[in-house]
Image: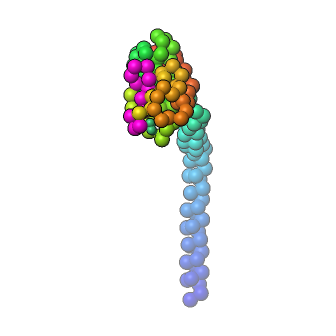
Protein backbone atom coordinates (compact mmCIF):
# COMPACT_ATOMS: atom_id res chain seq x y z
CA UNK A 1 0.00 0.00 0.00
CA UNK A 2 2.91 2.27 0.48
CA UNK A 3 4.23 1.91 -3.03
CA UNK A 4 1.12 2.99 -4.93
CA UNK A 5 0.76 6.09 -2.84
CA UNK A 6 4.43 6.86 -3.38
CA UNK A 7 3.96 6.44 -7.11
CA UNK A 8 1.01 8.73 -7.08
CA UNK A 9 3.00 11.26 -5.18
CA UNK A 10 5.83 10.99 -7.62
CA UNK A 11 3.53 11.19 -10.59
CA UNK A 12 1.68 14.09 -9.13
CA UNK A 13 4.89 15.85 -8.32
CA UNK A 14 6.17 15.09 -11.76
CA UNK A 15 3.04 16.49 -13.33
CA UNK A 16 3.17 19.54 -11.15
CA UNK A 17 6.79 20.09 -12.02
CA UNK A 18 6.06 19.79 -15.69
CA UNK A 19 3.15 22.16 -15.34
CA UNK A 20 5.22 24.68 -13.43
CA UNK A 21 8.00 24.39 -15.93
CA UNK A 22 5.54 25.13 -18.70
CA UNK A 23 4.03 27.99 -16.78
CA UNK A 24 7.42 29.44 -16.05
CA UNK A 25 8.30 29.12 -19.70
CA UNK A 26 5.12 30.87 -20.71
CA UNK A 27 5.39 33.58 -18.14
CA UNK A 28 8.93 34.34 -19.19
CA UNK A 29 7.79 34.84 -22.74
CA UNK A 30 4.86 36.90 -21.54
CA UNK A 31 7.10 39.10 -19.44
CA UNK A 32 9.58 39.67 -22.19
CA UNK A 33 7.13 40.33 -24.96
CA UNK A 34 3.79 41.54 -23.72
CA UNK A 35 4.44 41.94 -20.02
CA UNK A 36 6.78 44.88 -20.28
CA UNK A 37 4.57 46.77 -22.69
CA UNK A 38 1.41 45.93 -20.80
CA UNK A 39 2.89 47.12 -17.52
CA UNK A 40 4.28 50.35 -18.90
CA UNK A 41 1.37 51.41 -21.06
CA UNK A 42 -1.42 51.47 -18.46
CA UNK A 43 0.74 53.01 -15.76
CA UNK A 44 2.12 55.66 -18.09
CA UNK A 45 -1.18 56.66 -19.66
CA UNK A 46 -3.26 57.31 -16.54
CA UNK A 47 -0.45 59.04 -14.67
CA UNK A 48 0.26 61.19 -17.71
CA UNK A 49 -3.38 62.11 -18.02
CA UNK A 50 -3.77 62.78 -14.33
CA UNK A 51 -0.51 64.70 -14.23
CA UNK A 52 -1.65 66.91 -17.06
CA UNK A 53 -5.06 67.61 -15.60
CA UNK A 54 -4.34 67.72 -11.89
CA UNK A 55 -2.16 70.82 -11.49
CA UNK A 56 -4.81 73.50 -11.74
CA UNK A 57 -6.68 71.79 -14.55
CA UNK A 58 -4.22 73.38 -16.97
CA UNK A 59 -4.90 73.17 -20.65
CA UNK A 60 -8.60 72.28 -20.50
CA UNK A 61 -10.50 74.31 -23.05
CA UNK A 62 -13.32 76.28 -21.51
CA UNK A 63 -14.86 77.94 -24.52
CA UNK A 64 -14.21 79.70 -27.80
CA UNK A 65 -13.57 83.44 -27.90
CA UNK A 66 -16.55 83.89 -30.24
CA UNK A 67 -18.87 82.45 -27.57
CA UNK A 68 -18.04 85.22 -25.09
CA UNK A 69 -19.87 88.42 -26.03
CA UNK A 70 -18.11 91.79 -25.77
CA UNK A 71 -19.44 93.53 -22.66
CA UNK A 72 -20.78 90.23 -21.38
CA UNK A 73 -19.67 86.77 -20.46
CA UNK A 74 -20.28 83.07 -20.55
CA UNK A 75 -20.88 80.88 -17.52
CA UNK A 76 -19.40 77.38 -17.60
CA UNK A 77 -21.41 75.66 -14.90
CA UNK A 78 -19.53 72.34 -14.96
CA UNK A 79 -16.17 74.05 -14.50
CA UNK A 80 -17.69 76.70 -12.18
CA UNK A 81 -15.96 79.44 -14.15
CA UNK A 82 -17.34 82.56 -15.77
CA UNK A 83 -15.37 84.03 -18.68
CA UNK A 84 -16.01 87.68 -19.51
CA UNK A 85 -14.94 90.11 -22.23
CA UNK A 86 -15.28 93.61 -20.76
CA UNK A 87 -13.53 95.10 -23.81
CA UNK A 88 -13.07 93.62 -27.26
CA UNK A 89 -10.24 91.09 -27.11
CA UNK A 90 -9.74 91.45 -23.35
CA UNK A 91 -10.84 88.24 -21.66
CA UNK A 92 -11.14 87.69 -17.91
CA UNK A 93 -12.25 84.75 -15.86
CA UNK A 94 -13.61 84.36 -12.36
CA UNK A 95 -14.94 81.67 -10.12
CA UNK A 96 -18.65 81.23 -10.85
CA UNK A 97 -19.35 80.37 -7.22
CA UNK A 98 -21.10 83.26 -5.50
CA UNK A 99 -19.23 84.51 -2.45
CA UNK A 100 -22.50 84.95 -0.56
CA UNK A 101 -23.71 81.41 0.02
CA UNK A 102 -22.12 79.41 -2.77
CA UNK A 103 -24.70 79.33 -5.56
CA UNK A 104 -23.30 79.15 -9.07
CA UNK A 105 -23.98 82.50 -10.73
CA UNK A 106 -26.89 82.42 -13.14
CA UNK A 107 -26.30 84.93 -15.93
CA UNK A 108 -24.28 87.87 -17.23
CA UNK A 109 -26.08 91.04 -18.27
CA UNK A 110 -25.59 94.81 -18.30
CA UNK A 111 -21.96 94.51 -17.27
CA UNK A 112 -22.53 92.31 -14.25
CA UNK A 113 -22.35 88.63 -13.37
CA UNK A 114 -25.55 87.89 -11.54
CA UNK A 115 -26.43 85.42 -8.83
CA UNK A 116 -30.17 84.91 -8.68
CA UNK A 117 -30.16 83.09 -5.33
CA UNK A 118 -30.22 86.34 -3.36
CA UNK A 119 -29.47 88.96 -5.97
CA UNK A 120 -25.72 89.54 -5.79
CA UNK A 121 -24.04 91.20 -8.78
CA UNK A 122 -20.37 91.24 -9.69
CA UNK A 123 -18.63 93.49 -12.26
CA UNK A 124 -17.44 91.67 -15.38
CA UNK A 125 -14.17 93.67 -15.46
CA UNK A 126 -12.80 92.62 -12.07
CA UNK A 127 -15.35 90.46 -10.29
CA UNK A 128 -15.94 93.13 -7.63
CA UNK A 129 -19.29 93.33 -5.89
CA UNK A 130 -21.74 95.65 -7.65
CA UNK A 131 -24.73 94.85 -5.49
CA UNK A 132 -26.49 92.39 -3.24
CA UNK A 133 -25.41 90.57 -0.11
CA UNK A 134 -22.14 89.07 -1.45
CA UNK A 135 -19.33 90.06 0.95
CA UNK A 136 -16.38 89.59 -1.41
CA UNK A 137 -15.51 89.76 -5.12
CA UNK A 138 -15.51 86.63 -7.27
CA UNK A 139 -11.97 85.24 -7.20
CA UNK A 140 -10.13 85.59 -10.51
CA UNK A 141 -9.19 82.45 -12.43
CA UNK A 142 -6.16 82.36 -14.69
CA UNK A 143 -6.85 81.63 -18.32
CA UNK A 144 -4.88 81.32 -21.51
CA UNK A 145 -6.20 82.60 -24.82
CA UNK A 146 -4.66 80.85 -27.80
CA UNK A 147 -6.13 81.66 -31.16
CA UNK A 148 -9.86 81.27 -30.71
CA UNK A 149 -9.59 78.97 -27.72
CA UNK A 150 -9.83 79.95 -24.05
CA UNK A 151 -8.40 77.49 -21.53
CA UNK A 152 -7.67 77.38 -17.83
CA UNK A 153 -4.01 78.32 -17.33
FE1 LIG B 1 -25.42 84.34 -4.46
FE2 LIG B 1 -26.72 84.48 -2.17
S1 LIG B 1 -25.61 82.80 -2.96
S2 LIG B 1 -26.57 85.96 -3.69
**Rendered-image quadrant of the C terminus:** top right
**Rendered-image quadrant of the N terminus:** bottom right
Residue 49: image x %, image y %? 54, 35
Which is nearer the eye, 73 or 150? 73
Instruction: Judge whether 14 appears above or below 63 on screen.
Output: below
Residue most extreme to the top: 88
Which is nearer the eye, 112 or 8? 112
* Residue 55 magenta-highlighted: no
Which is nearer the eye, 80 or 47? 80
Residue 60 appears in the rendering: no
User: Could you say which quadrant of the image residue 70 lies in?
Assistant: top left
Residue 35: image x %, image y %? 57, 45
Residue 119: image x %, image y %? 41, 33
Instruction: Judge whether 118 appears above or below 124 on screen.
Output: below
Q: Which residues are magenta?
A: 108-118
| Residue positioned 58% across, 52% down in the render | 27
Regarding ligand 1, which quadrant of the image does it lie in?
top left
| Residue positioned 40% across, 16% down in the render | 69
| Residue positioned 60% across, 81% down in the render | 6
Amino acid sequence: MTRPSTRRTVLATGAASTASALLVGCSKYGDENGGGDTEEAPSAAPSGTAGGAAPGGGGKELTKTADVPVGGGKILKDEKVVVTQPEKGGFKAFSAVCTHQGCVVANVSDGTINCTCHGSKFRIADGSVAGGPAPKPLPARRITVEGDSISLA
